[in-house]
Image (cartoon, helix red, strand yellow):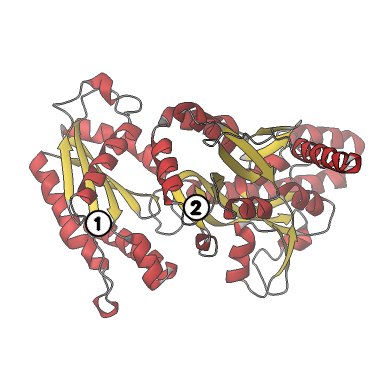
Amino acid sequence: MHLYRQLVAWVVTAAIFSWASVGMAMPSTGENTLTVTNSHSWKPFAFVENGEPKGLLVDYWRLYGEVNNVPVEFILSDWSDSLDLVAEGGRKVHAGLLYSSSRDLYLEYTLPLFEISASLYIVNDSEQLKTQSILPGMKIGVVRGGYEEEHLGSRYPLVELVAFDNNAKLIDAALNGQVNRMLLDTQVATYYLSQRADPYQFIPVDILYTKMIYAAVPEGNEALRDEIMAGMKKIPVLDMTRIEQKWLNTSRVFTVPGWIWPLGIVLVVLVTLSYIVLLRQTVQRKTRDLKALNKKLEAYAFTDSLTGLLNRRGLEKEFESRKVTALIKRHQLAVLVIDVDHFKKINDSFGHSKGDEVLMSLGKAFEQALEEGIALSRLGGEEFCLLLDVKSREQLDAVTEYICYYLVPSASQSDLGLQVSASIGAVLVDTNQGQLSLDSLIHQADKLMYLAKAAGRNTVRAKSLSSELKPSQLLGVMN
């Protein structure tokens, strides 16, 4: 009996140290407790520092718990372990990850959270930079179990993938010369590399994709999925923006570093004239390369990689000019949210490549038929947003009916039995109502879109907000 008690005590002590090693609190025993898991080395999204979970997603789920009065615990581990934990079932949610068909087999996805991109990073060496494309036989470092590993494995099957347990180990291995190339989330690489003595030891040469990250729960747990989605909708957009700015407001590494010129002055004193000339030539070449890369990255920052339309950031930028244009013309401003009906069924029945083809086809149809006086954006997934200035409610009704009953069905493929329809929510406001908020207008249009879906889909629900709301009500976030 004494030996048995010693064994039990040893197991409990080991469990406590195991939890402490990743900076987590012991799991709560409450039935309502929500277990949130993610990587412990995915800065700035989720990581452990001084034994405490931190990061953008950690702050988000803490806010979720406060808003919804739900106790939340965190378990941060290696990436593949975090996926296995959610797959076990129970009241568990993966804090944020990218969608893939393989993960869809054991996960139920909720609403999109934040946008993320992935870039190919190459060691900043003239010999390595001669080949910036991905070729068969190349060694590329990835995180084991991460979306990057799946992305390269499916699109570049002849590439040799070198997998590491987490982002910290991958970056350390790269900086120590174990790999010359690595595929990393751009925000994550920026965060890690900016803290190094030489942040330019690796530089990005291409953005391979830009996607939204989603929260996910165990497959088949629709009740938990619906609970999570309802709770996410209660979180104010302003708080979401505040958290995003807190963690993603890092200085960009793709600009000319400020220490180049002082270093040049020191070298003038230390080296001969021939070395000075060589240094100037090197600086000029790198400056040209960095400026070209900055221009390319700026285009990516405001563009949806799949359809070529504006992304949410690009739409926000365009929104300001559209308000001014509509005000000068004395027109009203309309915001349309267009959501493809039964899009998951399209992916399941015809494959994700066909789903992507439908989205690209819709983007081209919108651009070609509605070229003048509009701004087009893909908000994420199967959801589009249009900004346009119109003279009247009647003109808005004509445009929405044209989109719903003519443009959207043009993406159908009758020979495959693929029929495409969409539900549309539209709001109309006067531009002289004061300082309008794009988030608020999209929120209202999104609610109308869900009313259209509830009415049977393939229909439009529109509303004029000008006569119903005071200017102060159009500011901030509408619950």
SS under mark 1: strand
Q: CA distance from mark 1 to mark 2?
A: 22 Å
Which mark, residue 211?
2
Name which residue lies at 64% across and 62% down.
Answer: 149
Horizontal side of 400 relative to 202 (left or right) equals left
Contact (CB < 8 A) between labels 1 and 2?
A: no
Point out residue 405 in the picture as x, y percentages from the top left corner: 16, 60
Point out residue 393 in the picture as x, y percentages from the top left corner: 10, 40
Horizontal side of 468 relative to 18 (left or right) equals left
Point out residue 107 in the picture as x, y percentages from the top left corner: 51, 56
Question: Does residue 405 appear in this view?
Answer: yes
Pick the front one: 97 or 390: 97
Point out residue 58 in the picture as x, y percentages from the top left corner: 59, 35
Mark 1 is on which residue type?
Ala
Q: Is residue 461 above or below residue 357?
A: above
Name which residue lies at 39% across and 49% down.
Answer: 310
Q: Is residue 181 above or below residue 160?
A: above
Residue neighbourhood size for the residue with mark 1, other residues' Cα within 10 Å, grouped as few (<14), some (14–19), many (≥20): many
Q: Quadrant of the N terminus?
A: top right
Residue neighbourhood size for the residue with mark 2, other residues' Cα within 10 Å, grouped as few (<14), some (14–19), many (≥20): some
Mark 2 is on which residue type?
Lys
Tell me the quarter of the picture where residue 237 sits. Answer: top left
Horizontal side of 127 relative to 245 (left or right) equals right
Which mark, residue 422?
1
Mark 1 or mark 2, whichever is nearer to me: 1
Q: Is residue 333 above or below residue 239?
A: below
Name which residue lies at 69% across and 71% down.
Answer: 159
Question: Does residue 43 appear in this view?
Answer: no
SS under mark 2: strand
